[in-house]
């Protein structure tokens, strides 16, 4: 009986060691700020767009294997801005937070803009993307990042400046 227990214990340890070793080799996702590049924005829009002025949208796709190109449609910023600032972070749970702000808002009005930028590098896997817009609106998208990632998402907005056509 003791010998039988010894053999089962030995087999258990022998079988579990490869699993324990493989778990130790798993890499934690990278955390901290992500690189942001190629930031571009439109002029204040005149509401002659393919997307309704009542929608705030994101389109995203993989570029250069480990980067995500983001196109934002109908983002609210001040009517008179110098530029747009994009800050990003990613945490251990693969939650990406992007904060979009306007630089040097000089007018007493809001306007809709289209902006695009690229973030990365990202590892392949599931992500939660949370965008915080300059005037408090947020958008959350869950997606799987891979070499062929491509998607879009829109939210209806009914406050100013959305819906002013």
Image (cartoon, rainbow, N blue to C red):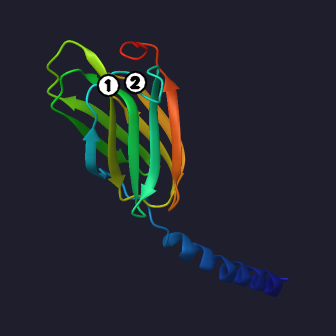
Give the total of numbered labels. 2
**Residue count near mark 2 (Cα–Cα under 10 Å), binned few <14, some 14–19, many ≥20:** few
Residue nearer the viewer, 161 or 142 = 161
Residue 51: percent from left, percent from top? 47, 29
Please, is residue 87 above or below residue 78 in the view? below
**Residue count near mark 1 (Cα–Cα under 10 Å), binned few <14, some 14–19, many ≥20:** some
Residue nearer the viewer, 109 or 20 = 109
- Which residue is label 1 attached to? 45
Is residue 32 rendered to the left or right of residue 53?
A: left
The image quarter containing residue 132 is: top left
Q: Which mark is residue 29?
A: none
Quarter of the picture holding the N terminus: bottom right
Please, is residue 131 above or below residue 54 in the view? below
Do tag 2 and tag 1 residues touch (Cβ < 8 Å)? yes
Residue 74: percent from left, percent from top? 39, 28
The image quarter containing residue 107 is: top left
Q: Secondary structure at mark 1?
A: loop
Residue nearer the viewer, 115 or 33 = 115
- Residue drawn 20% across and 12% down? 108
Q: Secondary structure at mark 2?
A: loop
Please, is residue 50 above or below residue 18 in the view? above
- Residue drawn 32% across and 25% down? 45
- Residue drawn 39% across and 36% down? 72
Which is more foreground, mark 2 or mark 1? 2
- Which residue is label 2 attached to? 48
For the residues labelled 2 and 1, the Cα–Cα distance comes to: 7 Å
- Residue drawn 80% across and 83% down? 2
């Amino acid at each position: 009986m003791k010998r039988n227990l010894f053999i089962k214990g030995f087999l258990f340890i022998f079988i579990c060691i490869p699993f324990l070793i493989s778990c130790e080799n798993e890499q934690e996702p990278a955390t901290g700020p992500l690189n942001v590049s190629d930031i571009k924005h439109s002029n204040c829009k005149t509401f002659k767009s393919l997307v309704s002025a009542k929608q705030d949208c994101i389109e995203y796709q993989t570029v250069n294997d480990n980067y995500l190109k983001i196109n934002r449609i109908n983002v609210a910023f001040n009517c008179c801005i110098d530029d747009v600032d994009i800050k990003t972070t990613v945490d251990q749970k693969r939650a990406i937070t992007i904060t979009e702000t306007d630089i040097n808002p000089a007018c007493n009005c809001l306007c809709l803009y289209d902006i695009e930028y690229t973030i990365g590098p990202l590892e392949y896997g599931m992500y939660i993307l949370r965008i915080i817009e300059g005037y408090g609106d947020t958008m959350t998208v869950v997606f799987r990042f891979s070499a062929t990632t491509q998607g879009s998402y829109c939210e209806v907005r009914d406050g100013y400046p959305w819906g002013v056509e």
